[in-house]
Amino acid sequence: MFTRFVLLSLITIVPAFGYAQHLFQEEPVRLKEVRVISSRLEDFAVGATVEKPDSALVKMYRDEPLSSLLTNVSGVSVKTYGAGGLASVSLRGGQNNHTAVLWNGINIQSPMNGGVNLSAMPVRFFNNVEIQHGGSGTLFGSGAVSGGVHLSGNDLLQMPNQLNATATRGSYGFESASAGFKTGSKNFGSRVSVFGQRADNDFSFSNTSRINSPNEIQTNAGIKQYGVLNENNWRISERSLITAGLWYQFYDKDLQTLMTSRRPNDTNQTDENYLASANYKYYGDDGVFVLTQGFIRNKVLYSNPVLVDPKSDNNSLSYISEAEYKYGFGTLHSLNGGVNYIYERAESDGYTVVASRNRLALFASGRYGLSDGQGAAVLSFRNEISDGNTQPLVASFGLDHIVLNSFRLKGNVSRNYRIPNLNDIHWKEDGYARG
């Protein structure tokens, strides 16, 4: 299995690129700010609170799962079910499927349950982590009701070539190892990161659910996971940049025996995920055109020998295609508009049918910048059609303004939405739930 990951990484020959200019003058000259590379989060999430963990903190948690890093960020609530168990993020009281998780601009929430397991995502894979608080449905679509977590890598063309590796060993059979390798030139950069972790989690505890609270050893709580991420940047001209990434992740978790259980549990869950992204950017004289493509393939196998149907197989895939254009009026004002298409398909033992869905969304934003760096105001709209059903139009208005050189007026009001995930619609009726 590990050989397959290495091969997947090595055959990724998708490049990327970015460019810089050097000016030499006898005396320093103060220039007005010019945005060369920016995103919707930076330009149009005006009025929202955006947190970015300190680089030293990111480095400290480089070999930990993303859930460990976010736990130490103010305002972020992470729900974790045991060591190595399911970990989900909650912002402003929302559930897991109310917080969008975006990798290189594509939403990686599961189309089946709308969730993302943060404990299966190592921090090493993401040099940039940003947490946006508050609804952002106009910018990032369904599921961004209470906020979003934005993940990406660094500009590889600016990174020095390097090789680094770490290894950790701890109690209860815990072992972890990771490595990163970056190579390239001024026009091409490529980075490969690998990660592996295992633990028995056979710790002793006082079982308070039994008479006299006897000491017991936890059983069936082991975990093993590994993954590989390859990213590439390629500068193909003075105005064009291509970025691409290929990510494979494997997660194998034994679901630990309950304290009230009289016999050891043999329940297990494995997750296998394939993700790919590609972005093309063209920098014109007055605007920037961005074309984004994404592919996500998830497979979850749940097994419990005591059930009538001992195994449950769940498979899903998503294809994302998005095009947007940002037109700038000078250095302060800009308009942004685009179209987003998503195809989703899922197959599960718990479904009544093989489910599929087509989603099409149009979005637009306008930014009015205030002079002398006094702030900005942004108005955004989005409308989505899902399998021919038009969703309600959503809008948002954000304001960030410095008043009297001492006070900052900052706020955002928005209407957001989450369309039903495929589990909500197609789950067959049983004794516990129905779609």
Image (cartoon, rainbow, N blue to C red):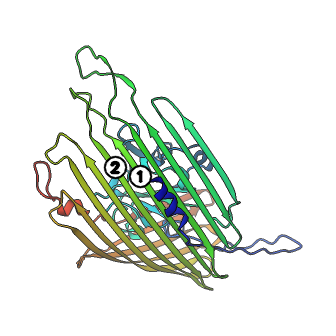
Instruction: Find residue 7 and report its horizontal and vertical position in percent.
Output: 51, 62
Instruction: Find residue 340 and report its horizontal and vertical position in percent.
Output: 39, 76
Question: Who's the residue at 38% across and 37% down the image?
Answer: 222
- Judging by the rendered image, the residue that carries numbered circle 2 is 270
Looking at the rendering, in which quadrant would you find the N terminus?
Answer: bottom left
Label 1 sits on what residue type?
A: Phe
Q: For numbered disc 1, what is the local secondary structure?
A: strand
Residue 227 versus residue 381 in the image, above or below: above
Residue 306 versus residue 334 in the image, above or below: above
In the figure, residue 237 lies in which quadrant?
bottom right
| Left or right: 171 as drawn, with respect to 111 | right
Residue 291 versus residue 205 in the image, above or below: below
Q: Crowding at label 2, few (<14), some or many (≥20) Cα neighbours within 10 Å?
A: some
Instruction: Find residue 199 and report its horizontal and vertical position in percent.
Output: 44, 36
Q: For numbered disc 2, what is the local secondary structure?
A: strand
Q: Are marks 2 and 1 in contact (CB under 8 Å)?
A: yes
In the figure, residue 263 lies in which quadrant?
top left
Instruction: Find residue 161 and report its horizontal and vertical position in percent.
Output: 70, 60
Farthest-out residue, bottom: 285
Question: Who's the residue at 14% across and 52% down the image?
Answer: 433
Numbered-mark total: 2
Say which label, 2 or 1, has the lower sequence index: 1
Question: Who's the residue at 41% across and 76% down the image?
Answer: 321
Q: In this rendering, does residue 87 appear at all? A: no
| Left or right: 429 as drawn, with respect to 123 | left
The residue lying toward the viewer, choosing from 81 and 350, is 350
Looking at the rendering, in which quadrant would you find the C terminus?
Answer: bottom left
Q: CA distance from mark 2 to mark 1?
A: 7 Å
Label 2 sits on what residue type?
A: Thr
- Judging by the rendered image, the residue that carries numbered circle 1 is 250
In the figure, residue 348 lies in which quadrant?
bottom left
